[in-house]
Image (cartoon, grey):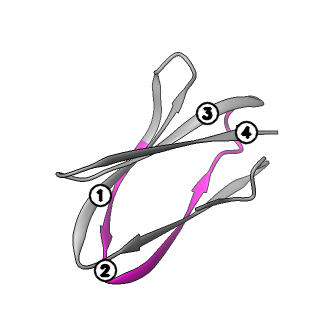
Amino acid sequence: DLFPNPATDVLQVQLPSPGRKTVTISIADMTGRTLWQREMQLTEGINSTAVPVDQYPPGNYLLTVQDSESRQSKAFIRQ
């Protein structure tokens, strides 16, 4: 889950996980250019992190969470 959407300063990201694993979280603009990326260790349950978005101009962006087995993306708006 991503909230708030649209976001102005910080995007809250909640990631459920069935167990311990490492994921890469990234933000890309609509041209596909990666603007931000970081690795995160997930534990069993709901994992939360705050992603600063205030340095990006208003527009549409894509947040992607990827591990060794899957990749999920969700669009958000920077207001």
Q: Which residue is mark 1?
A: 23
Q: Is residue 41 magenta?
A: yes
Label 2, label 1: how far apart the Cα atoms are:
11 Å
Q: Secondary structure at mark 4?
A: strand
Q: Residue at x 25, y 53 (%)?
A: 67
Going by the numbered disc 3, the residue's amino acid type is: Tyr
**Left or right of residue 47: residue 59:** right
**Mark 2–mark 4 contact, CB under 8 Å?**
no
Q: Earlier in the sequence, mark 1 or mark 3?
A: 1
**Mark 3–mark 4 contact, CB under 8 Å?**
yes
Q: Residue at x 78, y 30 (%)?
A: 58
Going by the numbered disc 1, the residue's amino acid type is: Val
Indicate whether 40 appears above or below 53: below
Going by the numbered disc 4, the residue's amino acid type is: Ile
Q: Which residue is mark 2?
A: 43
Q: Which residue is mark 4?
A: 77
Quadrant of the rendered image containing residue 59: top right
Q: Secondary structure at mark 3?
A: strand
Label 4, label 1: how far apart the Cα atoms are:
22 Å
Q: Which residue is mark 3?
A: 61
Stretch in magenta: 37-57
Label 2, label 4: how far apart the Cα atoms are:
28 Å
